[in-house]
Amino acid sequence: MTPQATVSNKGARRWAHGHPWIYRSDVIERPDAPAGIVPVADQRGKPLGWALWSPKSEISLRLLEANPNASIDPAWWRKRLAAAIARRDPLRAEANAFRLVHGEGDGLPSLVCDRYDRWLVVQLMSAGLEPSRGAIVDALLDLERPEGVLARNDVSLREKEGLPRAVELLVGTVPREIEVREHGVRYLAAPWDGQKTGAFLDQRENRARIGALARGRALDCFSYHGSFALHLARHASHVTALDSSAAALERARANAALNAHANIEFVEANAFDYLKQAERTGERFDTIVLDPPAFAKTKSALAAGIRGYKEINLRAMRLLAPGALLFTASCSFHLTKPLFLEMLHDAAADSGRRLALREIVGQPLDHPEILTVPETGYIKGAIVEAMD
Ligand code: SAH
């Protein structure tokens, strides 16, 4: 036994075709090494590069560096992280919160790092990555000079890796709430206990997009901290921000005050019930946003998830005033782009309305979706217009 991993031809082909993961069943010789970084070779002994090695995970190897002669030292981490961070430069003028590292999307498998103003939130999501925590944090400190670094390592993925789940302050101090600025809107992110790393940064550009088009009477259905509602309120006359979580709406209220918006009404309700009721009473809206949580978290939940998406979209379509706009999105990885469009088609067909597909949108540049790594992409969105 050696610290090297040997992978099957099938495993080697995955790397050759641009996907960094090699599953347990394609590891022919497991490395005699604890979780960490290991050299990888094919069945003929040809070196393929370096990978993160997770002995307990189904995803055993994640390709880190295809050059077998590279040494994965602190300078290597700094260079790889600096390249990812440099790609975000165009965002800095318009926002002070964005993703600096999007895991596999940036050639840094299982690592997420989000910047919120002067602080960083990281997520280390594989056993193979954990031993490099020190080198990663040091490089991030050097490159971004944050006042604190928080690890939101409470994600369930860590369990599959045999890692403990915890929220841990790694460096300095990190406030409970951080004021974020995004395309002229301000809101409070909650790095310690908010969803994801404190906010949904992945919809930032889509919020600004539909915000600029909004008008009249608007409805933001899964509002969370009011993120879309705050953008809609700049151009719409009245906004209903709806969420089933009272705690989320409490922060949404604080966010509305922060922006001095007096035209947002907050409704604590189940969106399915609300939309059904609004349809029954013949309500009409000029702008509607549907940004629900993932209804299909697993492949087996896909059919039920599609039914859920279709129901809210169908009802929202019926609530559109003539000429009104619907922004609709899904963050379910398993609902692929073709399935998302098929769902929209089916909802439109049942809605009795003539609807135009104005735009299909996806992820912003700080969440790069790699064509050969489908797992890096999960957000699909569309802007639909009621033609009559
Ligand atoms: N649009 C938000 C993110 C939405 S996250 C943004 O851009 O920041 C999904 C939100 O939907 C959560 O706040 C959750 O509380 C809420 N939610 C989940 N199920 C719901 C339901 N059935 N009705 C209304 N809100 C729901």
Image (spheres, helix red, strand yellow):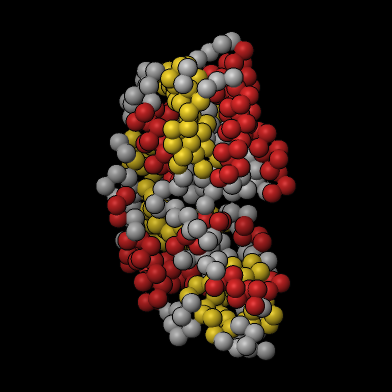
Farthest-out residue, left: 93
Judging depth in this view, the residue of 330 and 246 nearest the camera is 330
Task: Tell me where residue 226 sits by quadrant.
Answer: top left
Judging depth in this view, the residue of 148 and 360 nearest the camera is 360
Residue at left 43%, top 29%? 229
Number of labels in the image equals 0
Q: Is residue 161 left or right of residue 326?
A: right
Judging depth in this view, the residue of 340 and 137 nearest the camera is 340
Residue at left 42%, top 79%? 73
Farthest-out residue, top: 281
Q: Quadrant of the N terminus?
A: bottom right
Residue at left 61%, top 42%? 339
Residue 68 percent coordinates (x, y): 48, 83
324 vs 59: above or below? above
Q: Is residue 182 visible?
A: yes
Residue at left 55%, top 66%? 19
234 vs 237: above or below? below
Q: Is residue 39 visible?
A: no
Residue 270 percent coordinates (x, y): 61, 26
Task: Tell me where residue 95 sits by quadrant.
Answer: top left
Residue 382 percent coordinates (x, y): 48, 36
Task: Tell me where residue 161 sits by quadrant.
Answer: bottom right
Residue 8 percent coordinates (x, y): 66, 78
